[in-house]
């Protein structure tokens, strides 16, 4: 899979493709239905597939002070889109210029003059352009004008529920990881590079692998039973904290995974943390002694959850 950062980085060999546009936050089963239709059209036309995403996501740009919790960082989206067999992913920086671009200008500058697309596949609720002025019917008109076809997928329904990023987000907030798995088609995970933390957990006897969340807000907050991947041939069981560590009054969201029976230097390595079940909410403990006592309980509770849910 090839990553294209901005229209200005398009090369001649990128022209001529079947494309789709969207946030793809979580790359859930509804998104995968769009991608399946995209790939089928690409095979029929003997052309590569292209997915256009935005960074930051438009909802983050328009709600900067209180953005909705984000399911997937750009890194995680790329991991999932590559697993789906996509050829090109073009990331567009969502800024004032892009937010004010008309639907017509987006189609002409990005899709036609940029990608030279021959067919566009969109989800049933897709809208684009300034003030979301473009929709499926506008795209059909642009397609007739510029010579490309437009198709849209139907909503993906699971147990009478339309699969969406909003529904996945709600399942995660509720700690319903089995419900989230049904909507995602896989277990929920966070991927990132292990960075140096403040070493407080290590000093308390519970060393952690600290990851940058790479998002302003997460739908997760609390203690979770998890598996950590990419540190050996098998996933490693762990108990993982996601939150802002109220005991030290730090507003930054972090993810800290304590891997059981593991003591290796993994700074700089990229890992994937897969979430299995919620152990408890995040509590503002009055002292580190009380927190240490609780951490011992958390570890045992996490091990029980993982024993019942093998990797």
Image: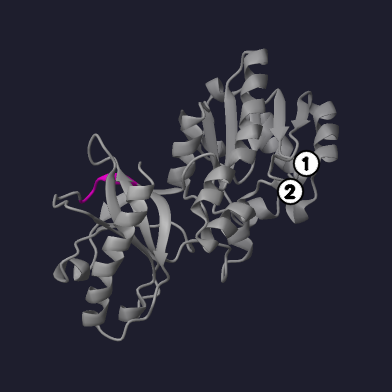
Q: How is the image coloured?
A: one colour
Q: Is residue 229 left or right of residue 59?
A: left
Q: Is residue 283 left or right of residue 124?
A: left
Secondary structure, mark 2, is loop
Residues 35 and 205: in front is 205
Give the vertical position of 47 relative to 250 (above or below): above
Q: Is residue 299 left or right of residue 1?
A: left
Q: Which residues are magenta?
A: 267-272
Q: Quadrant of the C terminus?
A: top left
Residue 270 sits inside the magenta stretch: yes
Residue 97 percent across, percent down from the top left: 64, 53
Residues 67 and 64: in front is 67
**Residue shown at 64% from the left, 43% from the top:** 22
**Residue shown at 74% from the left, 53% from the top:** 130
Residue 233 percent across, percent down from the top left: 24, 34
The answer to which quarter of the image holds residue 112 is top right
Disc 2, disc 1: CB below 8 Å?
yes
| Residue that mark 2 sits on | 129
**Residue shown at 32% from the left, 82% from the top:** 285
Secondary structure, mark 1, is helix
Instruction: Report if residue 16 is visible in the image.
Output: no
Residue 296 percent across, percent down from the top left: 23, 68
Q: Would you call the spot at circle 1 few (<14 residues within 10 Å), some (14-19), or many (20 or more)?
A: some
Residue 225 sits inside the magenta stretch: no
Instruction: Report if residue 100 is visible in the image.
Output: yes
Residue 46 percent across, percent down from the top left: 62, 13
Give the vertical position of 254 relative to 102 (above or below): below
Disc number at residue 104?
A: 1
């Amino acid at each position: 899979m090839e990553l294209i950062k901005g229209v200005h980085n398009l090369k001649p060999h990128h022209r001529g493709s079947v494309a789709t546009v969207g946030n793809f936050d979580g790359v859930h089963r509804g998104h995968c239905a769009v991608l399946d239709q995209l790939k089928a059209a690409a095979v029929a036309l003997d052309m590569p597939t292209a997915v256009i995403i935005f960074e930051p996501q438009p909802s983050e740009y328009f709600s900067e002070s209180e953005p909705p919790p984000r399911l997937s960082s750009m890194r995680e989206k790329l991991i999932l889109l590559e697993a789906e067999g996509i050829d090109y992913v073009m990331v567009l920086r969502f800024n004032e210029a892009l937010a004010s671009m008309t639907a017509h200008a987006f189609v002409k500058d990005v899709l036609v003059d940029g990608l030279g697309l021959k067919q566009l596949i969109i989800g049933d609720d897709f809208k684009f352009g300034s003030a979301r002025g473009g929709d499926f019917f506008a795209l059909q008109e642009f397609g007739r004008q510029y010579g490309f076809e437009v198709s849209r997928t139907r909503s993906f329904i699971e147990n009478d529920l339309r699969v969406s990023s909003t529904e996945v987000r709600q399942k995660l907030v509720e700690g319903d990881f089995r419900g989230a798995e049904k909507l995602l088609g896989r277990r929920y995970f966070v991927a990132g590079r292990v960075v140096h933390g403040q070493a407080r957990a290590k000093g308390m006897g519970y060393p952690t692998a600290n990851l940058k969340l790479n998002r302003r807000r997460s739908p997760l907050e609390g203690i979770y039973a998890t598996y950590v991947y990419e540190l050996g041939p098998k996933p490693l069981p762990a108990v993982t904290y996601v939150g802002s560590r109220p005991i030290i009054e730090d507003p930054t969201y972090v993810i800290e995974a304590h891997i059981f029976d593991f003591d290796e230097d993994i700074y700089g390595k990229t890992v994937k943390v897969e979430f299995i079940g919620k152990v408890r909410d995040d509590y503002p403990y009055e002292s580190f002694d009380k927190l240490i006592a609780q951490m011992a309980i958390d570890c045992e509770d996490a091990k029980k959850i993982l024993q019942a849910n093998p990797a």
